[in-house]
Amino acid sequence: MRKAVRLMLALSVLLLFLGGIGIWNAHTRPPGRPKTVGEEPVRKQPDAPKPVLLDRPTTLLLIGVDQRRDDPGRTDALVLLTIHPHKRSVKILHVPRDTKVRLNLGKGRTALDKINHAYALGEGIPSTVQTLESFLDIPVDHYVKVNMKGFRKIIDLFGGVDVNSPRSFSYLGHHFRKGPMHLNGSQALAYIRDRTGTNDFDRHRRQQQVLRSLWHKSKHPSTLLKMNRLFNILRAHSETSLTLRDAVSLCYTLSRVPEKNIETIHFRGHDQWSSRYYFIVPEKERLRIRSLLRRHLELEA
């Protein structure tokens, strides 16, 4: 898969969620002083922050959460970006959800389990972030989280997505044929979640197809007419640590990164079958990825 598609993965999420942050700030900002008769009209909202580069290397964790009724949910997708503003470079790490790690569950509790269980067994986002920070020995500066229901609604808002299925298969009552298909939100969600007869790496490729289509649709001028509905979806189904100023700087920095400076990295490892399935990252491989990311963030020489 071309590197540009990897960047689209990050940018499409940023576009949808950071765009929502801008709308959120516009709707929730405290009202200004009421104008009196004879005064010049005042703007309803202050100007957006001026776009500036990030002032230091920064990390962003993108989190997709599968939440169900009476269930806190589990992380269904974890993508970590390290962004170097002055080198204009980005590294994108996909973390397989079944990666076996030592979970930080809060209040001194730990457990050896799949990384996606940190959310449900611990304290949600804080446990997920702390577990990844410990595993990679790097700080997570910001996160963006969305649940799958919100993702489905966003796809329907944009009129569905177009994909090219690599094979024919069925999942959750939906049937997919090999070749080009147009999918609504429910179909797209099943398409990116299926792991029957395949693995997380194939799943990542299908996720990128959906996000690439969403990315192209979101650039259409008609998106402006959808912003209020998008805001309502994001308010109900997403969460982030980013402020509007953070978001503007992040998007501006990413827009200046040339394609040749985008690197996607994956853990190399092996499967482990016991009472449940795990993806095992050998210690040497963990240290390789750790060192690669720390050097990019200028945390070590």
Image: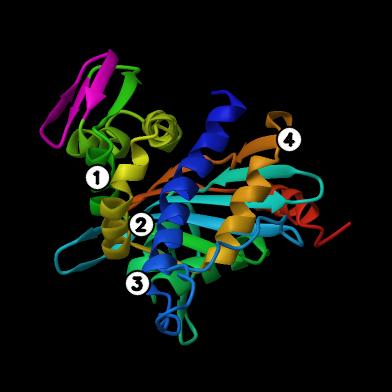
Instruction: Residue under label 1, please give it.
Output: 152
What separation in Å lies between label 4 and label 2 (alpha carbons)? 27 Å
Q: Nearer the viewer, residue 73 or 270?
A: 73
* Relative to 94, residue 144 above or below: below
Residue under the point 29% across and 14% down: 180
Q: Amino acid at mark 3?
A: Leu
* Relative to 8, residue 169 above or below: above
Q: Disc 2 vs disc 3: which is toward the camera?
A: 2
Q: Nearer the viewer, residue 276 or 286?
A: 286
* Relative to 284, residue 245 above or below: below
Residue under the point 46% across and 41% down: 12
Q: Amino acid at mark 4?
A: Asn
Residue under the point 23% across and 47% down: 153
* Relative to 188, residue 133 above or below: below
Confirm or deny contact between disc 2 and disc 3 (CB under 8 A). no
Q: Disc 3 vs disc 1: which is toward the camera?
A: 1
Q: Which residues are magenta?
A: 169-183
Instruction: Residue under label 3, please give it.
Output: 121
Q: Amino acid at mark 2?
A: Val
* Residue 197: x %, y % from top left: 30, 28
Q: Secondary structure at mark 4?
A: helix
The residue most toward the left is 173
Instruction: Residue under label 4, please give it.
Output: 261
